[in-house]
Image (cartoon, coloured by chain):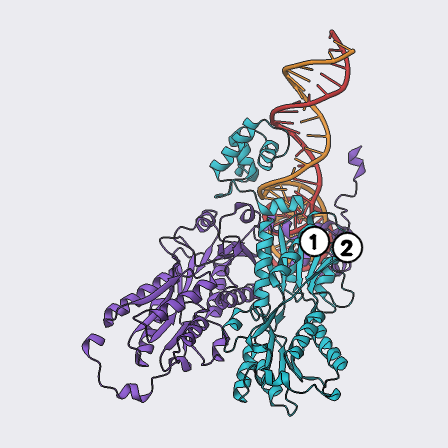
Chain colours: A purple, B cyan, C red, D orange
Amino acid sequence: MSRADTPRRGSRPGRAGIRDVAAAAGVSITTVSDALNGKGRLPDATRRHVREVADRLGYRPSAAARTLRTGKSGLIGLTVTTYGDEPFTFTEFAYFAEMARAATSAALARGYALVILPATSRHDVWSNVALDGTVVIDPSDEDHVVGELVRQGLPVVSDGRPAGSLPVTAWVDNDHEAAVLGILDHLADAGARRIGLLTGTTTDTYTRLSTTAYLRWCERVGQDPVYEAYPAHDPCAGAVAADRLLARPDRPDAVYGLFDPNGTDLLAAARRYGLRVPEDLLLVCCSESTVYASTEPPITTLSLKPRRIGTAVVQLLIDAIEGVKSDQPVEQVIPTELIVRTSSERRSPRTTISPPRSPEER
Amino acid sequence: MSRADTPRRGSRPGRAGIRDVAAAAGVSITTVSDALNGKGRLPDATRRHVREVADRLGYRPSAAARTLRTGKSGLIGLTVTTYGDEPFTFTEFAYFAEMARAATSAALARGYALVILPATSRHDVWSNVALDGTVVIDPSDEDHVVGELVRQGLPVVSDGRPAGSLPVTAWVDNDHEAAVLGILDHLADAGARRIGLLTGTTTDTYTRLSTTAYLRWCERVGQDPVYEAYPAHDPCAGAVAADRLLARPDRPDAVYGLFDPNGTDLLAAARRYGLRVPEDLLLVCCSESTVYASTEPPITTLSLKPRRIGTAVVQLLIDAIEGVKSDQPVEQVIPTELIVRTSSERRSPRTTISPPRSPEER
DNA sequence: CTCGTTGACAGGTACGTTTCTGCAAGGTCA
DNA sequence: TGACCTTGCAGAAACGTACCTGTCAACGAG
């Protein structure tokens, strides 16, 4: 009895299935599938006819069924780091926004869409979405999620070289050490005699590599390190740390800030202490924001080229999904760009003319 | 023959199916499904046993199969406006980043994930992902995508009240008119006598409502409108427009900028023309960026509360997905917040002490 | 003793595709 | 005229899950 109740199977209101199209076009399901997907050997007349009927019925193939059958969903995960409940990534710093934008664009161009997922291993969410692969932003040393994904055979590409022996498929990163050394040399060239650093307390690779590069540089040139560290995800702490740095007895005459908001923080702190930029204090910070072009004075920034990174990461990932999976990880280094502005301009001739520095000052 | 080749069906390497779990636990598929999903009537012992075996095998249910069966994917679309090839939304202005962040957070908290999709109706991408509903950011008058989605029976919630008769399920927005009027009054209170506007050439609701509110206010108080419009998605055009506005013969003594970067643009332009802020020029702009707290001088900003909007939009959408679908659209208005800083501080007593204005100046 | 009732499970079907295999009809060539 | 290939299409088997519909025992009530 109950069988007779539903003779019109699949007659869900609002959605026409491939069956309905086949019936309406007077052909078989196979023919419909082949006609719409451009496969099989069909005369153009049949193909056109099927397409036409499908259009008329407003047929849209079920993504779930297709995914189940083919094993490909066309979805790429994008992990965002969370602090507490809030997703941190891609809003705090312009870097993440730019990177995500480029990644989105690159994915869409190849027919994929991005799914935003938290870096924490909340199984409920991760296992509820069928992914073809994942982009991981700056994974920590022992990332649960990455391990799990790799175990499932999914390709994983990371933005930022993976710490430890994380088995990612590929990664893209800048040469952070070279970038920091370049900036320090640039500041020294501009007349800096004691360069300070505003850095973070977090353990991510970017912070770690940059800080050690700074320390190594200090050792090489014989300068005592002068730096303040703060939790980078707390914007207030940045302003406080900037203030601390300029309040020190061994106040630096040049500062490099590792994080995006450091430029304005340092500028405000300098103002409080009556320091002129660049006369009394040279300033550089790492940022993708355009506001530093129109601050007073404009501030020199280091760009990590997030657009290129986001694009590269997605390309590598989709290549891995679609193409031949090379066994060895693919590594790609994107060059940084130093955008020199007034805040790090060479000191006035006065300084240059001053007598050569004594050894202990060097 | 070929049938005998694959007696172990579903023995895909790396992924254990529900069948494997059932076999390993010595129960039926139904029992496994019931045990893991907390349904059916099973003794706790069986439930525990099944769960244990599933864990041991590393069983992860197939999201695609579950979606196909249940009709729910746990995915929510988030449209981003694109200009040319590039996704524009959520990177140009801090508003979008904050809004997306809040939306992501709210969705994850309820077990949903966000999928980033372009507002243009690229069918390839849209039809390839199974969505439970969609958040649309500031849809244009005749949005193809919205119509299509609604026709498929999917709930659509928009950030920004829909123009025309777009059949969205619900929407969330600010009271832009009230916000603009409030700012203009605030500036007038601070001593402004001719208030200019920096606005956009685009036809989105925000720009339109804000501009007409400005024009109405001007008419009411008897001031000639003084405004410049530019394509908001072009950052360079903003600086040029700011310059144009201050170069006019009828130069305003106060300006409100509708878009995020306008504050720095206007500040730079004021500097070029030797105008002091706030003595010669009062400044307010609509922005969520914190940089305006530490510019010189700090700039008064209007916050649209994107966090609250993003959260509200997602809550409404998920309510519509899971709960009772009310037929009439749900509308929700989020109050704005004016963060008053130095750039719009009341003019010095000199101005205040000056004789009451003549009618034509009013 | 019989009859409903409830607990604890198993079978089987449907979700909507893709695709492998098969099978006629018609053409080509020896 | 058959052997063989090509063309044009249909049948049916998966993909992995959820859930509806039994079935079979035990058990208390009448």
Q: Quadrant of residue B144?
A: bottom right
Q: Secondary structure at mark 1?
A: helix
Q: Name the kind of residue labelled 1 in the image.
A: Thr
Residue placed under numbered mark 2 in the picture:
A25
Residue A333 appears anywhere in the view: no
Residue placed under numbered mark 1 in the picture:
A31
Q: Residue furthest bottom?
A: B249
What residue do we see at 34% from left, 84% from top? Answer: A346
Q: Quadrant of residue A336?
A: bottom left
Tag 1: Cα neighbours inside 10 Å, few (<14), some, or many (≥20)?
Answer: many
The picture places residue A106, in percent across and down from the top left corner, at 54, 66
Q: Report the front residue among B353 and A210.
A: B353
Q: Report the front residue among B282 and A210.
A: B282
Whether marks 2 and 1 lie on the same chain: yes
Looking at the image, is A185 positioned above or below residue B53?
Answer: below
**Residue B304 located left or right of residue B23:** right
What residue do we see at 34% from left, 63% from top? Answer: A209
Residue A76 appears anywhere in the view: yes
Mark number displayed over residue A94: none
